[in-house]
Structures are given as structure tokens and as C-alpha cells.
RNA sequence: CGGGGACUAGUUCAUCGGUAGAACGCUCGCUUUGGGAGCGAGAAGCACAGGGUUCAAUUCCCUGGUCCCCGACCA
């Protein structure tokens, strides 16, 4: 991609009132744009990052045996009446509900348990049809009382939701535990260190759920975790406890702020019971389906990554989710030789399968290009200029000037050297 | 949904009762380029909407809207 073609360009100033880091940097870098409070466009750069996040999730879920699909976002009231959630006060706080011109009532999806259960009722007849693991990436609508923290809390956001159906509680928990491991791996591949934290089930279930929390000062959740074992609880359930000793190993409990990037719910048979969804067991008897759901918010992950990985100049993307691998800066592009060389390296990198953003702007100062490179946060910055490709002699001659975003020093390498650098990482 | 703040050029802000100004950005020249570079010119505004007070309102008052922050609630 040539930077001159990229939509949109970076901004020097953050929007007024933008306080959180992810809001400032993602907007300034041209990753996202706000339509109204809690509603964001994923611009080309932002979509690239989210696509990478999604791909990591997809790969790991697929290898856990899950299948991807896509469900509607517009839901008729009747299906939500089957579980009584349409009229639930807490649900009504966050679900957009409205009537069409004929008076028929609809809701916008904030989750899909009812829809999945409806689907299972149509297709799952026998124990032989189970277990099933189905997931999708889709927009979720939640009428948050207060959208805030940039893209971290929106009224419309992207979510990966996975649902599993099982013959028994035991089978459900086997997969539930699998997903814990899968989620840890997913987040780790994205560069996020997550803690599994026990929490309440909210409007989803009376049982407790597990949240995947990233520890950071700016997080809006408060969690309590043991410094020795893996005990961790959300504030909402921890506050009933006394003292500051771990209930499991008596070691010290720490309090920390965190961002919830994932949440998993062992729903049990509540939904299948309400919606009368059964399978036939080996003995020919009808049984309720055991059910669980699992969410990850890719757009929230996007914001979380920026909160964790940035410096005063801009974003520092982990390589696994960076929108491009290389930011190729062409300087002195008025000179034919340098320009030709920069174009050549751009094409060669692409031929090697390297994703490269080529700053081909003419008449833009070096400082501005470097500032943009730092703001956008692509892992490798490669500079081609008359210093390396025209008048020079010595070690820099015809070499590429390479700097990693998170390092200070530049060094000069050959094209082959750069490729092996990229392949190694 | 309670409390606070804001709304003026594309953006960030100044002005403050007498119909608007800067910086950045943008356009066009000239200059040249290693950390948001210089000079010059230009385009760009129903001052959120409605009502009131006043000879006169962007400015003061009221109502509504929107955005941001703090709380209560949540992927």
C-alpha cells in the first residue's frame, strides 16, 4: 500500500475531550472514526488490525473443533419471549427494542443465546448430533448508559461469540475448560497477558462466569487476585469476602484495574429448558441440552492493545496484529535514482509476501514521515534515501536503514538481511 | 439515570453585548527535506437548535440536542 493512497491521513491533534490513550492514538493514526458516542467506523488501518485479531481467534477456535457461521442481528420479539429476557428489566437497559411500521416488535442483537438455541432445536435430534461448537463474528448492539474510554466501551461493537451444546454437564465443562486454554493462547498470540477471573453471570446466567482480564491502570474493572496461586475474582463477587488472604492458599491478595477482553459462561440447561430444546439419549429418552457461551470483543482488543503497547510518539503494535510489517520511508524522492530504488524495494518486499506501507509522499519532510511512522506503529521502519542510495559510500551504501519501532538504534542491512530479520520474528 | 464541563473555520482553540480571529490542516507559488521545515498568497464560518432579555446576542437567561468527564451498570 502506498501511503499517498491510504485513507485517511494521520491527524496532528487528538479530538477535543479524548482522554484515553486508545481514543487519541487510534483516531490520530487513522484507525477509527467516531460517528456518535460509542459508535465507530473501522477505517482501513483499523480493519486490518481487527482482521488479524479475528484470524488468530478463528485459527484457534477452528482447531478446538468449532465451526464458523453467521446469524442475523435483527431479532423478532417472540423468540426472546421464550426465555422471558425480552421483558427482563436488566436486558431492557441494554437491548435496543423497537417496533416496525406495522407494529411488529424487534430487537437488535446484544447476544445470540436464543437464536442459537432456536437453531439447535431445529437440527439437533440425537445425542449423536452432540457436542456442537458454533461461533460467529458479528456486531453487537448494547445501549450502554455511558459509552466511554474510546473504543473500549461502545454501543455497537464487534464480538466473536461461540456457543457450545452438550449431552451432559460433564461434557460441557470439559469443553469449557478447553476454551479457557484456547482463550489464553489466543490472547497470548496477540501479545496480551490475561488473567482468568471469576465473576457473576450478569443477564446471561445465575451461575458464575469467567472473565479474561488484562491488567492495566486504565482498566475499568477491578479484580482481586492471589500473588501465588491462580485465584482471581471480580470485585462484584469478591466484596463479600473478608480480609486479604487468598481463600485457597492464604497468600496475599492484590487489587488491580483491568480490561475485560473475554468472558465465558457455563449456561447449563436454562435456555434449553425455557425454549424446550431436547435431544434423544441412547435410551430413547428426551434430555435437555447443556449449553455454554463464550465471547471475545475484537474491537475492545484493538483498544486494549493500544493501551498496553504505546509510547509518547504513538502505537507500538505487536507483530502478530500489526496492520503492516514494514513502514517503508522514501526520502529524497525527487531524485530519480533514490525514487527508483525505493519503488524497487517496495515491489521486492511485496514479492516476498511482506506487508508493506510505502510512504511515497514527495515534498513531505523526513520528520513528518518519521512522526507518522511512529504514530501508526508498524513494527519495522525501513528508510531509503540519498544517504543510502545515491551519493554515499561506506557501510551505508546501497543498504537499507532499518529500525524497529520499539528500539532506538537504526542499523544498515542488505535486502536479504531484512527478509531474514522479518522471517525470524 | 444523577452530577459537572463543553459546543465559534476541516481540526484544536481565542474573542465576549455593537454580525469574528489565530494556529494547524487545505489550495497555489517559491524554497528544499534526517524528527511534524521556511517565505508568500488564497479558499474556508447560519458561532448546535429554538425561545427569551436588549436599540443590538456568538456573547446574558431558559429549554432542547450533541459530545466529553465523574458516578451507578456492563463484551
Image (tube, coloured by chain):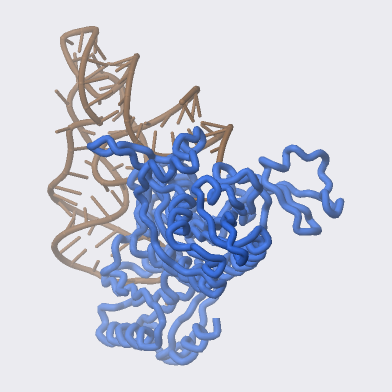
Q: Is residue A168 shown left or right of residue B40?
A: right
- Residue located at (67% from left, 46% from top): A234
Q: Position of residue A140 (x, y in %)?
A: 42, 50
| Residue B36 x/y as whole percent | 37, 60
* Nearer to me, B19 or B40: B19
Reply above or below: B2 against A12: above
Seen in the picture, residue A112 relative to A325 is either above or below; the reply is: above
Q: Is residue A327 toward the left or the right of residue A289 in the image? A: left
Q: Residue at x 51, y 36 (%)?
A: A90
Number of marks in the image? 0
In the picture, residue B30 is in which quadrant?
bottom left
Image quarter (top left, top right, bottom left or bottom right) of the C terminus of chain A:
bottom right
Quadrant location of residue B22?
top left
Q: Could you tell me which residue is drawn at 48 percent across and 66 percent down? A: A53
Task: Identify the residue at image location x=45%, y=81%.
Answer: A401
- The colour of chain B is brown
**Camera-side residue: B6 or A32?**
A32
Residue A184 in view (yes/no) = no
Among the chains, which one is blue?
A
Residue A378 appears left or right of A127: left
* Residue A295 image offset from top left, x and y in percent: 53, 56
Give the quadrant of the N terminus of chain A: bottom left
Left or right of A114, for residue A291 = right
In this rendering, does residue A206 appear at all? Answer: yes
Outermost residue to the front: A284
Task: Return the residue nearer the eye: B33 or A169.
Answer: A169
Residue A179 % position (x, y): 61, 64
Amino acid at each position: 500500500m502506498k501511503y499517498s493512497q491510504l485513507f485517511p491521513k494521520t491527524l496532528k491533534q487528538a479530538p477535543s475531550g479524548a482522554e484515553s490513550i486508545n481514543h487519541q492514538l487510534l483516531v490520530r493514526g487513522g484507525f477509527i472514526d467516531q460517528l456518535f458516542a460509542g459508535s465507530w467506523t473501522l477505517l482501513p488501518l483499523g480493519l486490518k488490525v481487527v482482521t488479524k485479531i479475528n484470524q488468530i481467534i478463528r485459527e484457534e477456535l477452528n482447531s478446538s473443533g468449532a465451526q464458523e457461521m453467521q446469524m442475523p442481528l435483527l431479532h423478532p420479539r417472540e423468540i426472546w419471549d421464550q426465555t422471558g429476557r425480552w421483558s427482563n428489566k436488566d436486558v431492557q437497559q441494554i437491548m435496543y427494542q423497537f417496533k416496525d411500521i406495522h407494529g411488529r416488535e424487534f430487537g437488535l442483537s446484544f447476544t445470540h443465546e436464543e437464536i442459537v438455541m432456536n437453531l439447535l432445536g431445529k437440527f439437533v435430534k440425537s445425542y449423536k448430533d452432540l457436542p456442537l461448537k458454533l461461533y460467529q463474528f458479528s456486531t453487537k448492539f448494547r445501549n450502554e448508559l455511558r459509552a466511554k474510554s474510546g473504543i473500549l466501551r461502545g454501543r455497537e461493537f464487534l464480538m466473536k461469540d461461540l456457543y457450545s451444546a452438550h449431552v451432559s454437564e460433564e461434557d460441557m465443562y470439559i469443553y469449557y475448560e478447553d476454551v479457557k486454554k484456547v482463550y489464553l493462547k489466543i490472547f497470548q498470540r496477540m501479545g496480551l497477558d490475561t488473567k482468568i477471573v471469576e465473576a457473576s453471570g450478569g443477564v446471561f446466567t445465575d451461575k458464575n462466569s469467567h472473565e479474561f482480564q488484562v491488567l492495566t491502570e486504565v482498566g475499568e474493572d477491578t479484580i482481586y487476585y492471589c500473588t501465588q496461586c491462580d485465584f482471581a475474582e471480580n470485585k462484584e463477587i469478591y466484596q463479600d469476602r473478608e480480609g486479604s488472604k487468598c481463600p485457597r492458599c492464604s497468600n496475599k491478595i492484590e487489587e488491580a484495574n483491568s480490561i475485560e477482553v473475554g468472558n465465558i459462561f457455563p449456561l447449563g440447561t436454562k435456555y434449553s429448558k425455557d425454549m424446550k430444546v431436547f435431544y434423544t439419549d441412547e435410551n430413547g429418552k428426551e434430555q435437555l441440552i447443556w449449553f455454554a457461551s463464550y465471547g471475545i470483543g475484537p474491537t475492545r482488543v484493538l483498544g486494549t492493545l493500544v493501551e498496553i503497547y504505546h509510547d509518547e510518539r504513538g502505537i507500538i503494535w505487536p507483530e502478530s496484529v500489526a496492520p503492516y510489517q514494514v513502514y517503508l520511508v522514501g526520502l529524497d524522492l525527487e531524485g530519480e535514482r533514490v525514487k527508483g530504488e525505493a519503488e524497487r524495494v517496495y515491489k521486492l518486499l511485496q514479492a516476498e509476501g511482506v506487508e508493506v506501507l510505502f510512504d511515497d509522499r514527495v515534498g513531505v519532510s523526513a520528520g513528518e514521515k518519521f512522526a507518522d511512522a511512529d504514530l501508526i506503529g508498524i513494527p519495522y521502519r525501513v528508510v531509503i534515501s540519498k544517504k543510502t542510495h545515491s551519493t554515499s559510500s561506506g557501510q551505508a551504501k546501497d543498504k537499507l536503514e532499518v529500525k524497529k519501532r520499539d528500539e532506538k538504534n537504526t542499523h544498515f542491512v542488505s535486502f536479504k538481511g531484512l527478509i531474514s530479520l522479518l522471517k525470524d520474528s
